[in-house]
Amino acid sequence: MATAPDELTILDIPIHNVTMTEAIDTLRRFLDEPVPRQVCFVNADVANKAYRDREYRQTLQQAAFSLADGIGLKLAGKLLGRDIKQNVNRTDLFPQLCEALEGSGHGIYLLGAKPGVPELVRDRMLERFPGLRISGTQHGYFNEEEEPGVIDRIARSGASLLLVAFGAPRQDLWIRTHLEATGVRVGIGVGGLFDFYSGRMARSPQWMREMGMEWLYRLYQEPGRMWKRYGIGNALFLYRVIKEKYLGGVPS
Ligand code: UDP
């Protein structure tokens, strides 16, 4: 990239070590250039999934821009003697990016989550940012036969930015495969982002986020699903980072 921000590698995944402001500026620049680019948010759960999944790891490796999402990555940086500048998580980035795109003419396509959810996100974001352009919406529960129609609608919408909320790794693999066909300039996998911004799921209080404790709040909301991801996942991730540091090697 022209303005190469400093980079580090954690468990064989390249991370662009940037602040939130630098991330928004880079995305803004990508949107002005007629080149399709994939952007990934990397958190401990993503790194754990990629550790055992070569195809997913390669997808993250070939992304144009990978952002350090969450406290787990910050801790991993510390273990590796590198200071991760900021927790550039998707939930904080989304409204800032919407603000940056107001009046720019660059449209966003919201793809994923349950039927009705992306439409709620559209309405709420347009209320907050009236100059924003939402080029289209589509839920994430379509089947294989419906997929070409979905891709075609995105291409015809003229969107510049595609946000895909299918969960990891499916969303990132989907973007890798279909980015060119959708005709967008930037495709980003955003996980459960739309559930937050549809108002269907409460976000942790600001003070918890600032302390990097958002994961604790998600654990409280969905203990059945989240205990494995956070309780075991974060510990496993940090164990793997330490193991890689002293013994080397991610399985091929
Ligand atoms: N989802 C989807 N299609 C599917 C399965 C899941 O659109 O076939 C959506 C789901 O509704 C949710 C998101 O993908 O909005 C995944 O959220 P999760 O919290 O698991 O993702 P994370 O943020 O942890 O990556």
Image (cartoon, grey):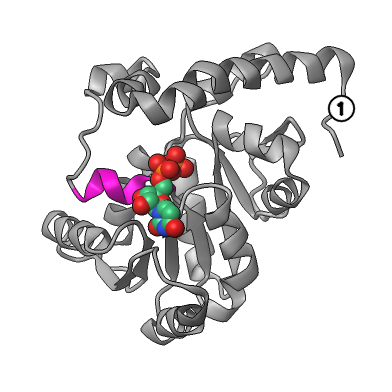
The image position of residue 115, as x and y in percent, is 27, 63
Asked whether residue 13 is in view, the answer is no
Seen in the image, is 115 located left or right of residue 55? left
Quarter of image, res 80: top right
Seen in the image, is 152 located left or right of residue 198? right
Q: Residue at x 56, y 32 (%)?
A: 45
Q: Residue at x 77, y 35 (%)?
A: 12
Q: Nearer the viewer, residue 93 or 4?
A: 93
- Characterize the magenta stretch by its predominant secondary structure: helix
* Above/below status of 92 relative to 29: above
* Above/below status of 233 relative to 148: above
Q: Residue at x 29, y 17 (%)?
A: 208
The image position of residue 1, as x and y in percent, is 68, 55
Label 1: few (<14), some or many (≥20) within 10 Å? few
Q: Quadrant of the C terminus?
A: top right
- For mark 1, what is the residue? 249
* Above/below status of 208 relative to 190: above
The image position of residue 247, as x and y in percent, is 88, 15
Q: What span is in magenta?
A: 191-198
Quarter of image, res 106: bottom left
Q: Nearer the viewer, residue 11 or 24?
A: 11
Q: Residue at x 24, y 58 (%)?
A: 117
